[in-house]
Image: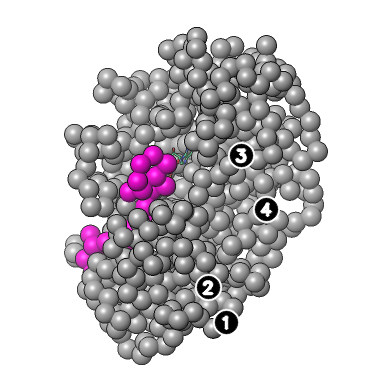
Amino acid sequence: MMDYPLTLPHILERAGRYFPKAQIVSRLPDKSLHRTTYREFHRRAKALAESLCKAGLKKGDRVATLMWNHYAHHEAYFGIPAAGGVLHTLNLRLHPNDLEYIVNNAGDRFLIVDDVLLPVLEQFRSRANFERVFVVNHSGARLPAGLEDYNDLLATATGEFAYPRIEEREASGMCYTSGTTGRPRGVVYSHRSTVLHSYNCVLASSMHIAASDVVVPVVPMFHANAWGIPYATTMMGASLVFPGPYLDGESLLNLFESENVTLSAGVPTVWLAVLQLLEREPTRWKLAKGLRLAVGGSAAPESMIRAFDRLGITVLHAWGMTETSPVATVATLKPEMERLSADERYAYRAKQGYAMPFVEMRVVSDDGKEVASDGKAMGEIQVRGPYITGKYFGMEPTPDKFTADGWLRTGDVATIDEEGYIRITDRTKDLIKSGGEWISSVDLENAIMGHPAVAEAAVIAIPDPKWDERPLAVIVLKEGARASAGDINRFLEGKFAKWWLPDEYVFAESIPRTSTGKFLKSALRETYGKRGAGAAAKSKVG
Ligand code: AMP
């Protein structure tokens, strides 16, 4: 066979050649809808590659983006790697000190930024070393001194451009982990890993992306490459719809309706908000038949999967992390499972699924041995494969992150059943250890979110003099709904051993989020962790 490299310019060229009429729709900061086609996307992304080369970009140079999800970010996804550069997506929700650390650690040369995010940039720009900053000027207002217009950069391209020769193992992108403990760490993706990951995303046993799809990555393009969806969707020539900065349930549903969206992807907190709106007004939005929602980043509660089913919407539960490109498992059913009872099928779909092709996975206990595939024994998930990172940027692999035999230690605790489906029970640091036994916060949260009055729930460990740690549940009720601690406790009885049930329930207005939209348990631990059992008499269950 020929030694043909798996690189991103191929996908860009293919999109322009075979799918010029496919649509790209973006919600802009002023809420208007920007419409373009793959023909124009191909022209502009290639112009970006050419103009970056003209600006002196060298192989392997990092170009940062600080942008919402929209057409120009999509151009950067392809134009930067096609120039031989490395697309470095910055998480716009991070603290300026973290952004400063990240851009300096990565050594970013250039930056492309949304005009509406200039206030974020200004908080760390003087401490960063960008040679040039290009602004996607949505409003058309005059730019501050020292900043250049992104369209002016593109205008320097002639259209006469040959891509530099790119080897498939060369870097195409990088992304920093959310870094809830310690400094953020950089993960570098290659052209090859990105292409192979794209193949896995489009498989029928995965997200099943075809040219006929209309796809909305709600997951931000700075969160693990929007789960690879912009690459996979472009590879298949499906239409793309970008939500811009508007990620609330109502804006998303309006977009799903007007663009006839068939597939979307995001974290559970996004879909819980969407679900509440749909349950309140089930006939208000006319959504495409067979709409699928890929859910990951945190566990999708079984109650949510069932509720969407009742509305004719299919949830696809997936697991992964920045280090795994990210999609490593998807919970699609095997054919013989279709004959199981509804309860059994939901139990499988609420798991995180089994490993995608070329992802190897094992679940290992503290003594270093693989746990039994019985769906009960817990251990750490370890993975390896062609799109799993082998080290962090600028660091040698350390034993806490990589095993001696070359597997990534994910820090996720899970069971694995005889069919190979994993079920995440916790992050190592979120497990609750009560009287020497582990309690899964994820299991409790999912069960509590099955109560009809509950919108959101997060469970954390609080110190306990007798048991070491005990669970505390923080609950947000649905608008207008009522439930007491006793009601929730009764709802959980029978579902869990008695000693698993939370000692305390706290009712809150909201649960703080991480920069990628997950429940921020460290903040909850800070607020409630020191109270100890008994401190909140009114919410304590006796
Ligand atoms: P990030 O690198 O920010 O995407 O975070 C990755 C982490 O999110 C994983 O290590 C898991 O702890 C968590 N995660 C991702 N998908 C799921 C899922 N389907 N269920 C439970 N946890 C998940």
Q: Does 410 sit left or right of 523 as displayed?
A: left
Residue 474 location (% of width, % of height): 62, 30
Closest to the camera, between mark 2 and mark 4, is 2
Q: Does 13 sit left or right of 294 as displayed?
A: left
Task: Give the secondary structure at mark 3.
Answer: loop
First along the sequence among labels 1 and 2: 2
**Which corner quadrant of the image does residue 288 belong to?**
bottom right
Query: Of the residues shown, which amino acid type is indicated by label 2?
Result: Asp
Check disc 2 and report the residue beneath it.
115
- Residue beneath the point at 35% across and 46% down: 183
- Local crowd size for mark 1, using a 10 Å CA cut-off: few (<14), some (14–19), many (≥20): few
Q: Which residues are magenta?
A: 166-185
From the image, which quarter does the N terminus lie in?
A: bottom left
Where 253 falls versus 366 (above or below)?
Answer: below
Nearer-the-camera pick, 496 or 151:
151
Q: CA distance from mark 3 to mark 2?
A: 30 Å
Check disc 1 and report the residue beneath it.
141
Q: CA distance from mark 1 to mark 2?
A: 9 Å
Are the residues tagged 1 and 2 within 8 Å (C-beta)?
A: yes
Query: Of the residues shown, which amino acid type is indicated by label 4?
Result: Gly
First along the sequence among labels 3 and 4: 4
Residue 481 location (% of width, % of height): 79, 35
Q: CA distance from mark 2 to mark 4?
A: 24 Å
First along the sequence among labels 2 and 4: 2
Determine if the magenta segment contains residue 167. yes
Nearer-the-camera pick, 64 or 280:
64
Task: Give the secondary structure at mark 1.
Answer: loop
